[in-house]
């Protein structure tokens, strides 16, 4: 590797470590504020939507049907593994049928 590659790698590692440390030590001071706490409570859903929705839009009809089935199974069973498995099975069935 070239010298500039090593410099880039070291700077990215330093940035990553510093962000983790700021989150680790700075998070102690943010917990007491109600606004920040409500944003942190909403963050997992927002991250999930940011990861899932773009991929779902690219999957077409099988992806949409699988998403609906997965959400319905999650509401009914409250079991993440079962709902994910149901979505996978529905996607496979849709593709096997030719949808």
Image (spheres, rainbow, N blue to C red):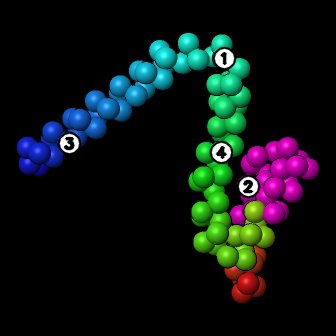
Mark earlier in primary sequence (3, 4): 3
Label 2 vs label 4: CA separation? Answer: 19 Å
Sequence-first disc among 3 and 1: 3
Residue ranking furthest to the bottom = 98
Q: Is residue 65 above or below residue 97?
A: above
Q: Secondary structure at mark 2?
A: helix
Q: Is residue 25 above or below residue 77?
A: above
If the image is split into quadrants, where does the C terminus sit?
bottom right
User: Which residue is at a point 71% across and 28% down the rendered structure image?
Assistant: 38
Give me the disc on residue 8.
3
Q: Residue at x 22, y 40 (%)?
A: 9
Please indicate whether residue 6 sits to the left or right of residue 96 in the image.
left
* Residue in view at x 40 percent, y 28 percent: 19
Q: CA distance from mark 3 to mark 1?
A: 37 Å
Label 1 – label 4 distance at C-alpha: 20 Å
Residue 84 screen position, x and y as percent: 73, 55
Point out the tag, 2 or 4, that comes first from the N-terminus: 4
Q: Which residue is mark 2?
A: 84
- N-term-proximal mark, 3 vs 2: 3
Counting from the top left corner in percent of width and height, residue 87 is at 75, 62
Disc 1 or 2, which lies upstream in sequence? 1
Q: Which residues are magenta?
A: 68-92
- Where is mark 1, residue-wise? 33
Q: Which residue is mark 4?
A: 46
- Residue 91 appears in the rendering: no
Q: Comparing marks 1 and 2, which lies closer to the viewer?
A: 1
Q: Secondary structure at mark 1?
A: loop
* Tag nearer the camera, 1 or 4: 1
Using the image, determine if residue 8 lies above or below residue 17: below
Camera sees residue 10: yes
């Amino acid at each position: 590797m070239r010298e500039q590659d090593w410099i880039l790698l070291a700077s990215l590692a330093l940035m990553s470590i510093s962000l983790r440390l700021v989150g680790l030590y700075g998070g102690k001071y943010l917990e007491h504020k109600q606004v920040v706490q409500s944003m942190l409570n909403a963050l997992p859903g927002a991250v999930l939507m940011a990861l899932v929705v773009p991929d779902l839009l690219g999957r077409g009809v099988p992806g949409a049907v699988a998403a609906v089935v997965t959400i319905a199974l999650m509401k009914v069973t409250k079991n993440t593994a079962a709902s994910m498995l149901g979505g996978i099975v529905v996607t496979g069935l849709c593709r096997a049928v030719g949808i």
